[in-house]
């Protein structure tokens, strides 16, 4: 009887250690990949900013972005941030030119900007792909937005990044 108990105890302990190893691997996996998924999102806070090919003014200007252009920070080098944008393009931007401003950017060719949060409201203007907006507030699936030029309206969340 004692032998039987010891055998069951050994099996129980080895099953426990396998379970602990499995949980450890899962937790490790989540920790590693949650950092990738949780890139810091910032937005341009000046009227226009240069996006460069590297972290410094000696690097070529790749393109320019306007106020409220949202970026997901993936790396920092001194006072420069490497980012990825809504199209998957990467570049470098000077840290003082971006801040924690809630912002979105249109990702469709023609986006109706409405006077209220729903399709029953009038279209006040149409935004093309790649137009950045400051996010003012949310109402279910609708976002109240404002462009740098002051134009305001509501857009469905499926039309922005």
Image: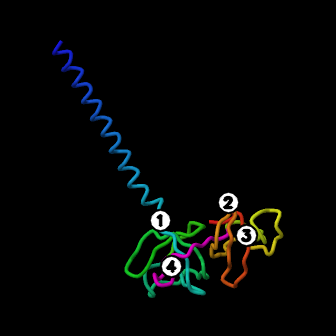
Separation of marks 3 and 2 at Cα, in angstroms:
12 Å
- Residue at the disc numbered 1: 39
Q: Earlier in the sequence, mark 4 or mark 3?
A: 4
- Residue at the disc numbered 3: 154
Dot in front, 4 or 1: 4
Q: Give coordinates of residue 59: x percent, y percent.
A: 46, 84
Residue most toward the top?
A: 1
Separation of marks 4 and 3 at Cα, in angstroms:
23 Å
Residue sitting at x 42%, y 55%: 33
Q: Earlier in the sequence, mark 2 or mark 1?
A: 1
Q: Which residues are magenta?
A: 92-106
Kindly state the secondary structure of the residue where label 3 is placed: strand
Residues marked 2 and 1 touching at CB (< 8 Å): no
- Residue at the disc numbered 2: 140
Mark 3 surroundings: few (<14), some (14-19) or many (≥20) residues within 10 A: many
Q: Which mark is residue 91?
A: none
């Amino acid at each position: 009887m004692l032998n039987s108990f010891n055998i069951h105890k050994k099996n129980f302990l080895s099953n426990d250690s396998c379970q602990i190893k499995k949980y450890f691997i899962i937790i490790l996996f989540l920790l590693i990949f949650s950092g990738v998924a949780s890139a810091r999102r910032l937005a341009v806070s000046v009227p226009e900013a240069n996006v460069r090919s590297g972290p410094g003014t000696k690097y070529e200007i790749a393109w320019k972005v306007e106020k409220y252009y949202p970026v997901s920070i993936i790396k920092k080098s001194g006072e420069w941030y490497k980012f990825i944008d809504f199209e998957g393009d990467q570049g470098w931007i000077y840290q003082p030119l971006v801040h924690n401003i809630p912002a979105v950017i249109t990702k469709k060719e023609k986006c109706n900007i409405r006077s209220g949060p729903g399709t029953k409201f009038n279209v006040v203007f149409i935004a093309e792909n790649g137009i950045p907006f400051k996010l003012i507030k949310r109402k279910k699936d609708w976002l109240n937005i404002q462009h740098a030029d002051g134009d305001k309206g509501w857009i469905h969340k499926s039309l922005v990044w």
